[in-house]
Amino acid sequence: MMPNLPFLKKKQPEDRSEIFRASRRDFLKIGSLAAGGLVLGVNFQCSGPKGELVTFAPNVFVSIGSDNLVTILAHRSEMGTGIRTSLPMIVADELGADWSKVKIVQAEGDESKYGNQNTDGSFSVRMFYEPMKKAGATARHMLMQAAAKEWGVDVAECDTENSHVVLKGGSKKIPFGDLVAQIQTMELPKAEDVPMKDFSSYKLVGKDIPIYDVKDIATGNAVFGADVNLPNMLIAVVQRSPVVGAKVVSYNDEKALAIPGVKKVVKIEGPGLPAGLDKPLEGVAVLAENTWAAIKGSRELEIEWDLGPNQSYDSAVQLEEMVKSTTSNGTAKRERGNFSQAKSSSGKVIEKTYLAPFYAHSTIEPPAAIADVKADGSVEVWAPSQHPQWARDAVSAALGIDVSKVKMNVTLLGGGFGRKSKPDFVAEAALLSKAAGVPVRVQWTRECDLHHDYYHSHSAQRIVATLDGSGNLTGWNHHTVFPAIGSGLDAAPPSDGELDLGCRDFPYEVPNIRIESHETTAHTRIGWLRSVSNIHHAFAICTMLDEIAETKGVDPVDQALQLLGEDKNLTFAGEMVGDYGNYGEKIEDFPWSTARMKKVIETVAEKSNWKSNLAAGKAVGFAAHKSFLTYVACVVMVEKDANGNLVIPEVHYAVDCGIPVNTDRVRSQFEGGAQFATSLATTSAITLENGRVKQNNFDTYQIIRMSQAPKKIHVHIIPSMEKPTGVGEPPVPPFIPALANAVYKLTGKRNYQLPFQV
Amino acid sequence: MEKYVINVNGKDREVSALQDMPLLWVLRDLLDMKGTKFGCGQALCGACTVHLDGEAVRSCSLPVSEVGTGKITTIEGLSEDGSHPLQKAWVEHIVPQCGYCQSGQIMNAAALLSRNPSPSESEIEAAMEGNLCRCGTYNRIKDAIVTASKSL
């Protein structure tokens, strides 16, 4: 059992952050800085493991050079959400920097310097919006103080724009760079003396801003994990245990070594069972002068495996067992009223079972990492890591060296979706570089990636809904079972953290609720995929609600609004067995607001013309689901083309994510989320037989292609001044049931299993 | 190991490689040209798309011995300064999310536009079917291709 889920924010909100002056030396370590610049950092005070305040220092976020160049550090990993642009935007906007003269430098992985860098759980903007504002505002205030002194005016007469301090009225202006000499010796202003800009004066935040790397990407110059090249580097391709827990008995590398270019064969010791979340699998690596020789060499390895206890595992058999277990009594995880009584006195019972498969992340960039173990025992690493500190720790543990001897560079990620939080591939590179005595790039093939992922769990759920004689929903009994994240051969239920992802936090006004979990085992590595267990929970709940509405003869949108009841903040007080996680936030800070949920539902219904008559051959489906503290409602339209293939002509989303920082990236995450979810709903599934994953490449593990993508995706962002929340994951969960409900209306056949057939 | 002279982005390059080494690894490992990406190794995802005599090919599945005197163009050679209409349209529409598949998408789209300067939506879909994007940028790719086609 995992006590904490790493993708959930574990630290308290960073509202106790402090600005400090960093030494120039600190900044020179991470990037260019013109002589005589101002360097400001943010001290984050967070709760430590025992609730004590921990100050991270010195983390450096903004510098201004005498050349007027503003350099901002991106300390979160860029995997496609736009975070490398969005957080610096906040600093630049408060500062009044000329965005075209801002340089963004990627921070290395070092939690002692930069605080939490775990780019996961849709919490980067939520966690760092305020600290980034403070960093920008403090630098701005100091620059204005210096200009005010020079001009002999009150600081209130000054403003900043385009990297200049300006005198209000426009008669004087001075570039930031000309003021850095004066502010080097200036005392830092007290936080309460630093004015923050009014939201309405922002020029970047709340607008469509292009991502920083767009030109580099369009010209092939962006640097991803496998793109770093070092002198004398060898490339490693590994044959890993085909069944999780398998151990190498013996191997013959004669044929592999005969391939021209192959230099060395190295065994990687794996942990066996439990496989863990951060250790390499056992395997045999072929190291060669180029990737092709390594691939060929790895194919020629002859390995005898002791396959271990997972060799007879069959995922279809387990799924049947899980379905069976949902018909027994589970462990109650939430109780309201008395469901059993509601059932015995109900007029009608609807009972359905929902299945979802294992999913692989299948980032188009397969895992790759580079390590250079030096003669003095230290190591420099380059990797597309979502969680650079965890990668640093994993390398330190693998090599048995102090973490201070690991320099962890973060490249761009060619997709992440949770896969690249796990540092197994980074530790592999370090182990192999140590064994070879030269820099090594470990390169996963697509087959490696699909066979050895940390999969999204397959799941079985049974929901029993009861209606009284007048058709009112009186009871809701949700059974859920799936192999838990990080679990193994010992039977375990899903953790509370996983149940809090869209299952226990069922928000509707039903007088009798009983949520039950069941135990099962894991026979492959279970991790987390974009939206995590919200994926299968939202599928079951939102399609069941559609079926209930149909049974009652009411509109599903009207039903959702009615079941949410009056405007109020839900606390689930007294109902949860164990604490409710609320994505790592206090429920007082981020309440569950039925008003905000109703607003997105009403908006999506209005914008999609939900109640208008559709042309023949078209159908629409609706679902709403809050996840990662962001409110989302979705309407999906479907039809069939002349060949009978499903077409999704139009999707409407309404989203309330509080203050939207970069509106273009909010929209792009929803556009992408709809497409990602279309794959989960209609094309993708991982299955295992004899402990082995059956899918090898994109021919058998299919993700949607352009013609299968929704044609038009409209994203309606609710204007809001609430605290910002993330948008990486929330688009996925409601899309799948909205699509399923639309397909039902089109075909008359309900789908209870993902991926569904149309 | 054999010696090959291949023409990449207008320059003859001499490499020494196994004859079955895919062009992808010649470009990436032997010539240190990292713009062309590895995704699947089986011509199933399109991340490695380059041009051979103007036609889009999957470099992960094209052995170097079969390149012959054909002229190879990679993302680095599509334009000198990112000024190809598709590259400009990619920036205008802010197409990329993670960006990893986009070299292949742009190269595939460039081959499409060179044989069909004003493709319909269904022609774009048919031509781009071999290029996967996991982030889900298909809509913006389509829009950018339409924008670029108008500026040709």
Image (cartoon, coloured by chain):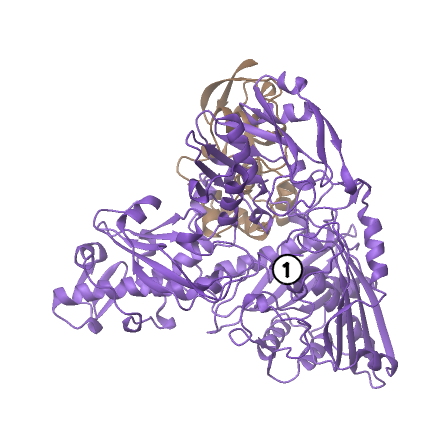
Chain colours: A purple, B brown
In this picture, is A654 found above or below B96? below
- From where the camera sits, is residue A29 visible? yes
Q: Is residue A393 left or right of residue A21?
A: right
Residue B27 in the image: state x and y as whole percent.
51, 27
Q: Is residue A457 left or right of residue A158?
A: right
Residue A389 in the image: state x and y as whole percent.
49, 49
Tell me the quarter of the image containing the N terminus of chain A: bottom right
In this picture, is A640 found above or below A266? below
Tell me the quarter of the image containing the C terminus of chain A: bottom right
- Mark 1 burial class by Cα count in 10 Å: few <14, some 14-19, many 20+: many
Q: Chain of mark 1?
A: A
| Residue identified by numbered label 1 | A732
In this picture, is B145 found above or below A336? above
Q: Is residue A322 left or right of residue B43?
A: right
Residue in the foreground of this view, choosing between A712 and A411: A411
- From where the camera sits, is residue A203 visible? no
In this picture, is A334 found above or below B71? below
Residue A264 in the image: state x and y as whole percent.
58, 22
Element on which disc 1 rests: helix
Q: Identify which amino acid the numbered label 1 is placed on.
A: Val
